Amino acid sequence: MTVVTIDKDICTGCQECTKVCPVFAIEGNPHEPQTIVEDRCVMCGQCVQKCKSYISSVDHGIELYQKKRAERNLPAAVTEPLFAAHNVSHIQEVIDVLDRKAKFTMVQAAPAVRVALAEDFGFPLGSLTPGKMAAAFRKIGFSRVYDTDFSADLTIMEEGTELVQRVTKGGTLPMFTSCCPAWVRYLEVNHPNLTKHLSTCKSPQQMLGPVFKTYGAKLNKVAAKDVFSVSVMPCTCKEFECSRPEMKGSGERDVDVVLTTRELGYLIKHYGIDFANLSEEPFDPPLGEYTGAGVIFGVTGGVMEAALRTGYKLITGKELKDIDILPVRGNEGFRKAEVQVGDLTLKVGIVTNLKNIDPIMEQLEAGTLDCHFVEVMTCPEGCISGGGQPKLISDKDIPEAYGQRRKGLYDCDKGLPLRKSHENPDIKKIYDDFLKEPCGEKSHHLLHTTYKGCEGGHH
Ligand code: SF4
Ligand code: SF4
């Protein structure tokens, strides 16, 4: 399937995109249209962020602009320049379902969305607007406004438990995070012999998908087949992830459509919503409750920090006192830290930007990577810098935008009353009422997966 593509009519062959592609998937001669080699592409959308070739109605005339907008299936409310490198949009499918009111629509939005969306409405870079985003979802007409931050907490319960089991029962180590689908695809394509190192946990998006169509459907007294599940992600690769054939834990396709943060901006404009003047609203309980641990998933090192906050409790039975785990924060391409967890010195690593992965893969192949647990995010600073985020037209805005988005998520975490996933009362409830226990039978069926190259994995 094509997720990210380059429009030959618009591409000028400046090759800016080739500089940021972490897997050298873009080919072409200078000053000629470039092509993406789909077999190599991990669909991260960094080329979409970087592309400088565009058409606009002002520079190229309204007719050509409208033709291109129609080719991309974008609504008439979109008036901004259209760039050569772009992701294939599914916004029209969402509009059709919302307008027909034929389905019970449930929406989730990833942590990094709320810290960037407002940039497309003239707010300062990195403005944090979860309340306005929730209000916008309601005005758009979604039946339930849930939150990926909830399932980030759920992921930590499952992944933390899996890590403890691997460490104490002699499972494959180091364990690598599996929430970045571009990283998972990279490993499956390039090192299928190493996919046993991936956590079997689905990503937060793909955990909430089957939860929507089972537990969520039951709570709302609707049939799974009547639920239309939409997720809003900072990520272009999430559309690929949700279309993987194994992502049908509920019996239906778990996530029906993924929109990027940019496309949510288009949807808000399409419905004529005055985003800037929206009053703050909460997410819907119970699948919209979250802790600070869920929030920091959007930034490099965040999954690791969240996992350590809960892993400490799982291993020692005690609460970690100082939960700001500073050694895992930062934006260096690879950083390592040691955290004392009872008698165990837990060695962790964080990789951000897939461009930094080669030495780690060499060490993993050679058996010399001295870590228990490694987080990998494909994008330069994790999902806050994802390919589906508002486009930063000027490169000089990039450090400021990433810095402010990162700060927004850490500030949000700091300001929340609950900051550890296992303290989320609605996480406790979903285990009591439905899942029973982390890594139990039901979790195994709904929340875990297999990979190419693994025993029992698909090919
Ligand atoms: S989507 Fe990512 S991997 Fe694919 S061509 Fe663009 S930058 Fe490269
Ligand atoms: S780092 Fe985040 S935004 Fe980037 S490809 Fe991975 S999951 Fe998507």
Image (cartoon, rainbow, N blue to C red):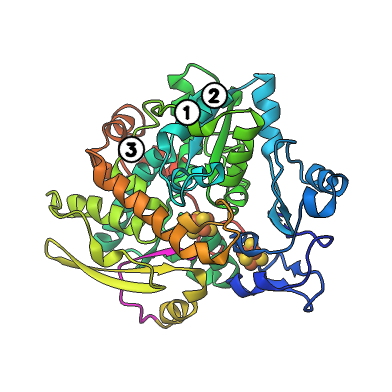
Residue 308 visible in the picture: yes
Badge 3 marks a residue whose secondary structure is loop
* Residue 363 in picture, x, y percent from top left: 41, 81
Q: Is residue 223 magenta?
A: no
**Residue interval drawn in magenta:** 367-381
**Between 152 and 54, the one nearer to me in the picture:** 54
In this rendering, the answer to whether 449 lies above or below 144 is below
Q: Earlier in the sequence, mark 2 or mark 1?
A: 2
Q: In whole angstroms, how far apart are the C-alphas of marks 3 and 1?
A: 22 Å
- View quadrant of ligand 1: bottom right
Between the C-alphas of marks 2 and 1, the distance is: 10 Å
Can you say whether 348 is above or below 103 in the image? below
- The front one of 427 and 443 is 427
Q: Which residue is mark 2?
A: 139
Nearer the observer, disc 3 or disc 1? 1
Helix, strand or loop at disc 1?
Answer: loop
Observer-nearest of 290 and 275: 275
Residue at x 47%, y 75% (from the top left corner): 356
Q: Residues within 10 Å of mark 3 (few under 14, many from 20)?
A: many
Position in image of residue 22 (x %, y %): 57, 71
Q: Badges 2 and 1: C-beta atoms under 8 Å apart?
A: yes
Circle 3 sits on which residue?
A: 290
**3 or 1: tag closer to the N-terminus:** 1
Q: Which mark, by number, is residue 278?
A: 1
Kind of residue at disc 2? Lys
Callout 1 environment at 10 Å: few (<14), some (14 to 19), or many (20+)?
Answer: some
Quadrant in the picture for residue 77: top right
Q: Nearer the viewer, mark 2 or mark 1?
A: 1
Residue at figure coordinates x 85%, y 49% from the top left? 61
The reply to whether the magenta stretch includes residue 368 is yes
User: Where does the image place residue 421, in percent across and percent down from the top left?
Assistant: 28, 43
